[in-house]
Amino acid sequence: MIIDGVFSGGGIKAIALIGALDAVERRGIEFNRVAGTSAGALVAALVAAGYKSKDIETLVDQTDLKQFMDKKKSLIPIPFMNWLKVYWKLGLFKGDALENWIRDALNARGIETFADITEGSLKIVVSDISRGRLVVLPDDLEEYGLLPERFSIARAVRMSCSIPYFFYPITLYNRLGQKSYIVDGGVLSNFPIWLFQRKDRTSIRPILGFQLSSDLEEIPSHRVRNAFEMFYALFETMREAHDNLHISKQDARDIVFIPAQKVSMIDFQLPEETKRSLIDFGFNRTDEFLNRWIVSRARFIEKKKNRTV
């Protein structure tokens, strides 16, 4: 079966998507187009580059995730410097290490820009908080005077992964020279399943979504005991509530919900056993879902054929 895949953001929780991909591959399902936000954009880019689940698992196993917390060196005491960085740089970490890691992984497959993959096969969502709008890459790059075929996919993924106050935002300029700050696509659309839907909410081929949250009726509450927890709860609410508002029950039939609630999206110091648990959790949730989904899709396709005869 050939499908289009959509991957939600979720920070480090996206390790669970490795297991989800494994379950999909074992069923002989292949992706024609992929889209994603934040960490989901990273997974989508690797899939578009030809990576399989075991390849991605090997990449993660060989990587010290703490390297992605790349602070700029300073002689100023660290606690005070952290506040200065958030104030002036709008984030704690540069994000260079993450971008370089993605670039190396893509270059290993001979891929650097959007010209190196099939046109339309990869869509990445970012947020332009200066203009207050959602941006889809590579489609909207020309609005910033940039050529899609020359734009780095690693850069696009890094832009989508710019968690507010965690990673530095990326700066772009439009044709009038106006500055825009680009941050995590999850601020405006953490699960862009709408990208592959037509106006009548139908699609060219089956869409399978992978959402790193609870399903529509089981969204957990957030404990708020201080300002930091309030920000986390606020950001998580924005990430989930917007898309859930626009996901119908019909859409939900094509979505694997992978609620890795016990793992923080910014915990880059996960022990190995937790990584393995996430992968297994993603596999089990997806494998169970596919038992029902493949049968229902087959029936739907058969009915569609009968209507056209």
Image (cartoon, grey):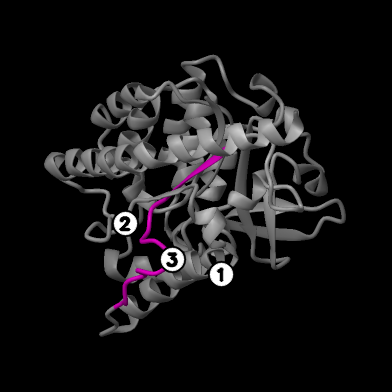
Q: CA distance from mark 3 to mark 1?
A: 9 Å
Residue kind at label 2, given as amino acid type: Pro
Q: Which residue is mark 1?
A: 245
Is 96 covered by the magenta stretch? no
Secondary structure, mark 1, is helix
On the image, the x and y values in percent for residue 80 come to 32, 71
Residue kind at label 3, given as amino acid type: Leu
**Residue, x 64% and y 34% (percent of image)?**
205
**Circle 3 crowding by C-alpha within 10 Å: few under 14, some 14–19, many from 20:** some
Q: CA distance from mark 2 to mark 1?
A: 18 Å
On the image, the x and y values in percent for residue 23 come to 33, 31
**Residue, x 28% and y 55% (percent of image)?**
260
Disc assigned to residue 216: 3
The reply to whether callout 3 and callout 1 are in contact (CB within 8 Å) is no
Residue 265 is drawn in which quadrant? bottom left
Which corner quadrant holds the C terminus? top right
On the image, the x and y values in percent for residue 245 come to 56, 69
Residue kind at label 1, given as amino acid type: Leu
The residue nearer to you, when weighing 145 against 229, is 229
Is 220 covered by the magenta stretch? yes
Q: Which residue is mark 2?
A: 259
The range drawn in magenta is 206-222
Q: Main secondary structure of the magenta part?
A: loop
On the image, the x and y values in percent for residue 77 come to 28, 65
